[in-house]
Amino acid sequence: MTLDVAWAVDWVRACARTVAEHRDELVELDRQIGDGDHGENLNRGFRAVVAKLDALDAPPAQIGDVLKLVATTLMSTVGGAAGPLYGTAFLRASRATAVSELDSGGVVALLEAALEGIVVRGKATTGEKTMVDAWTPATEAAVAAADGGAGPADVLAAAARAATDGAQATIPLVATKGRASYLGERSAGHLDPGARSTELLLAAAAQAAA
Ligand code: ADP
Ligand code: MG
Ligand code: MG
């Protein structure tokens, strides 16, 4: 089994839906340890992505074309930290997916490239209470699932489950990157908004593949 361009389009539309549904939750999480704009930033960005998808005459030929559209739109419409971080993630992912179909190895390549983009851009490592704490275990789980012979949908499901666990594990952490780091020890006891949004985006990827 493989994932095609229609999956990529479904994924992106599912991202827009879940971000809209969870907008207020993401705002509230970011209000606790940041400036309260994460939900609105992402919602604005993914609404712009959907508008661009709707305006296309025909679906793009390659999965990477869809992800490139997401990247450029997020970079130009989402401010703050998350815009450039997710923008770079989707840009790197698009370069890793210049194909019309993805098998399990292709899904792993997409996730690894996205994580690499976030790390190159934000210079965070695991344990700093950022979206890296959801993306890293998600990517590791994807590698393990693919190595075990899972198909692409099951690889994404494993990644999404690991992202959920990774996001929950940010709660006790003290932030050392991004706005939340200004709070020092007071950042502990809160779920990182970017880790939560990563969980939502990867759950959308798995749902679109199921
Ligand atoms: P801002 O903090 O500029 O308002 P957002 O609220 O949109 O931006 O995004 C905040 C999220 O960005 C954080 O919850 C965290 O997950 C992520 N983040 C911030 N800085 C970094 C970084 N250097 N590396 C990775 N992720 C980061
Ligand atoms: Mg913010
Ligand atoms: Mg901000």
Image: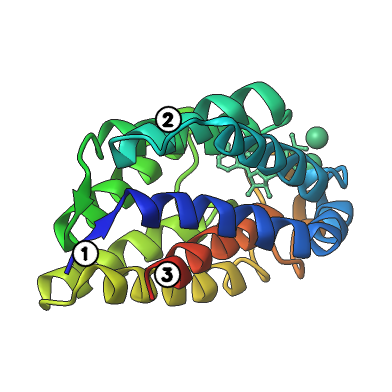
The image quadrant that residue 120 belongs to is top left
Q: Secondary structure at mark 1?
A: helix
> 139 or 92, which lies in front?
92
Q: Is residue 69 left or right of residue 159?
A: right
| Residue plotted at (84% across, 43% down) | 37
- Identify whether 134 is placed above or below 112: below
Image position, residue 176 (x, y; %): 63, 45
Q: Which residue is mark 2?
A: 68
Q: Which amino acid, mark 3?
A: Ala
Asked whether the beta carbons under mark 2 and mark 1 sit within 8 Å of each other, the answer is no
**Which three-letter amino acid code belongs to the residue tagged 1?**
Val
- Considering every residue shown, the one lying at the far top of the view is 76
Whether residue 182 is visible here, answered yes or no, is no
Q: Which residue is mark 1?
A: 143
- Label 1 and label 3: CA atoms lie apart by 15 Å
Secondary structure, mark 3, is helix
